[in-house]
Amino acid sequence: MKVTRAIVLAAGLGTRMAPLNLCRPKPMMPMWDEPLLGRILDLLESWGVHEILVNLHHLPELIVSYLRERAARGGPRLCMSYEHEIAGTGGALRRAAWFVPDLPFWVVNSDIVADLDPTVLVREYKRHKPLSVLWLHPALGPRTVEMCDGIIRNFVSARPGSSGTYTFCGLHLVAPAIARYVPEQAGPCSIIDVYCRAMRGGRTIRGVCVKNSFWADAGTPAQYLDAHARWLHAARRKRTQAGRPPAQAADHARGAHVRGWTAVETQAAIAQGAVLERSVVWRGARIGRRARLVHAVVADGVCATGELRGVAVPAELGGAPCIARALRLLGWAGTEVVVDHLAERGSDRTFTRLCRAAASVVLIRYTAARRENRRYAGHARFLRRIGVPVPRVLHDAPRARFVVVEDLGNERLQDRIPGMRRKDLLRLYGSVLRTVAVLHTDGTRAARRRRLGMEPAFGRRLYGWEQDLFREQFLERWLGLRSREIRALRTELDGVARPLEKLPHVLLHRDLQSSNILLVGGRPVFVDFQGMRLGPAAYDLASLLCDPYVSLPECVQERLLTEYTRCVGGAREVGYEAFWRAAVQRLVQALGAFARLGLRPGTGRFACHIGPALRMLARACEHVGGLPRLQRLSETAEHARPAADCAFLEYDQECGN
């Protein structure tokens, strides 16, 4: 059976890719100098597809121009279906009924990167005659599809990521009978809704996993960068197996310093001396000789002259009204400004660097979901008054939910530690601890005197919340432990928290880890302090000295704990038992957070910290004692992690990230 027709879905707004979607529609974004749409069309053509229908909506003129240029070169017949209002996947099939009247056809998303042999899908269709055969992946992605014996039972699993769940890869072989299950009325309609309707009517939807295939979702900026790295890795491996040397990673960036990999679209202007690392540069961008791009996507119209991380678009395409308002507050409206959307950091806040010439600031946007976010500006002013260095607040707009702060760069404590001599390490952490001592002593007195509004103090409820995070995200979702095992671990953890509740309280940073300490001229500056509250000093010290991002040696931890006691004049000496007990509590909270973020698209990189956190937890359990189950878990669970998260990390490491 030959499948000769296909529908390519390219009408979406691409909102997950914002603000890049304001520069180009997602199907036209380059993947190693070839539009995502072009790669899908090439794949379909290689399968023998003769006619392809592409639906359009967002910025259609760019797609139309590309399709006309491609059609002029020959190949499959290309048709277009413009949707004045987005019809959804199911609605697209309703509009395309004329194109696929009586034969099975392919339906494929235009925002995926794929390489596979379609034979197994065709064979499954011929053998079972289902309504549709879906390409599924058993390891990567969110894994929300439940399948048993090749038959899909549920598209929205209540246990995503567990055994028997898969990810739909955006490609299906569909029978023309699908039209019977598409609602006739106009309006958006999802293909999943259509499938569910068909399943209720007794029709079968099957799924298959294809061996030796490649799939990547390029739906968000982080996934878009990850797809580049993984595609390069796969291409190099294929070339090596064929006996050919790997291709150059950045043929259009000669004269620049390329580290790891960088994809530069033809016609981009790259000056000699620029540093490019794990980044994508579109053809309409200009990169100056002093520019440094790190894990960045630089869109058309951007002139990069300094350091950029994340997503950079021209200011007029910033994608949020608060950006325009921030530019007016800064007096930058009407000038050439680069909007650099920084990578996700695992919170509900977004960070955007606004750059004008040599000046730059950071715009922090937040939602109303967490009350503590509104406290950032007030806490920053309070901390500066008592001598704790934090970024200076330039503008605070609580009604618009954003704050503008000075840009103090990207160097964090965690970046400085690798390879550092022990003497220098002790000196650097000593300077951090002197600042912590000011927070815990002067800060505590000032906060109580001024009745500073803060989050609720540490107590049974907060300790319980941290342990619940560990149970739900790490023990249940990551490790898949049984309820009996989890109850036994919870009993041990209750015994950890109770003594902590009796310790005296000081003013805490709450998330005092190396990623939240900037280094400016070698001087520590605290960030992410909006969750500041009262609690035991041991908690802050455990956060800093047992930080999985750094993994300090035990002898260094002991020296620094003694240094802290000296800094506070012995007034708030933290005993070793309290310190290690707080370390257990803090590390289980960190493991819960790492598991939650590691299972989310765009933040999978946090999974790499689970191993160090477990090793540090094993050390803490040895000091506390009476935690046999938790210690055994921390010593054996490091390699019991979902294959999906391993894949992200492996590709990152092998491609030089």
Image (cartoon, rainbow, N blue to C red):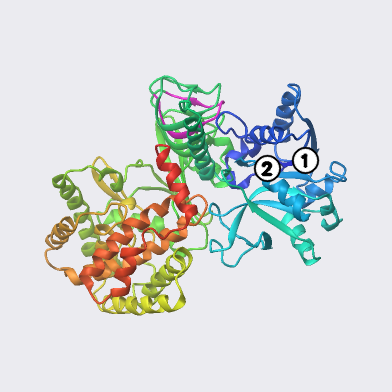
Q: Position of residue 371 (x, y in %)?
A: 47, 64
Q: How many marks?
A: 2
Q: Which amino acid does the dot numbered 2 rest on? A: Pro
Residue 331 or 246: which is nearer the viewer?
Answer: 246
Mark 2, Cα crowd under 10 Å, few <14 / some 14-19 / many 20+, is: some
> Which quadrant is the N terminus positioned in?
top right
Decide whether residue 281 is among the magenta residues. yes
Q: Position of residue 100 (x, y in %)?
A: 84, 43
Residue 479 or 398: which is nearer the viewer?
Answer: 479
Decide whether residue 402 is among the magenta residues. no
Q: Which residue is mark 2?
A: 118
In the figure, residue 26 lies in which quadrant? top right
Q: Which residues are magenta?
A: 274-288
Q: Which residue is painted at 43% across and 47% down in the image?
A: 649
Compute the Cα span from label 1 to label 2. Answer: 10 Å
Q: Position of residue 146 (x, y in %)?
A: 63, 62
Q: Position of residue 345 (x, y in %)?
A: 44, 51
- Residue 88 can be seen, yes or no: no
